[in-house]
Image (spheres, rainbow, N blue to C red):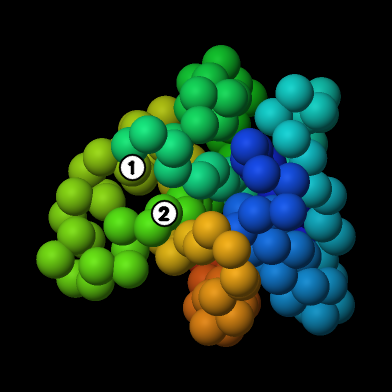
Amino acid sequence: MHVCIVYDTKREKGATKQIVEWMMEELKTISDIRVDVKRPWEVENFDYDLFVVGSPIYWEKPMKSIVNFLSFNRDNLKNGKVAVFILCLAEAFGKYTKGYIEAQYLKPLEKEVLNSLIESGVFRGWLRNPDYRQKQICSKWIRKVIEKAKAAKR
């Protein structure tokens, strides 16, 4: 299976990049997975079995570059499999913010790929020190995404 992780960030040493690196690490432990990591403007080819697309939340919204990538490439992605994820600090407030996070942060990404969407994920972001608890959550999530993608392929 050939996977493309597409993400954007404003902080090159921030949480989003670290989550993507953890996903890559986990995917490399699965024997039949090849993974490419790209920024939205670097994607020229849509010949992947799975796209994993993620964004941090800035000013109450996913990054415009990610929303635009999904929107502009809706036709390229419609026959494939797509998983989306976000990173936000609001996740730190627990179950009370779950509905808000889903409606305000995930929905703009999900609505662009409704027919292709196989999974959505929310990770807790951080500003200074990495939250290493997110590594296990991230690893479990990406394995779940792979299992769903493989099941949908059959």
* Residue 17 placement (x, y as % from top left): 69, 54
Label 2 with label 1: CB-CB less than 8 Å = yes
Question: Residue 135 sits in which quadrant?
Answer: bottom right
* Residue 13 placement (x, y as % from top left): 73, 54
Residue in the foreground of this view, choosing between 6 and 132: 132
In space, the residues marked 2 and 1 are separated at their CA atoms by 9 Å
Give the residue at mark 1. 105
Residue at disc 2, secondary structure: strand
Q: Residue at x 38, y 58 (%)?
A: 89
Give the residue at mark 2. 88
Image: 85 above or below 123: above
In this view, the mark in front (2 or 1): 2
Q: Is 29 left or right of 81, judged from the image as shown?
A: right
Amino acid type at circle 2 is Cys
Question: Residue 79 sits in which quadrant?
Answer: top right
Image: 95 above or below 89: below
Q: Residue furthest top?
A: 72
Quarter holding the C terminus? bottom right
Q: Is 103 left or right of 85, judged from the image as shown?
A: left
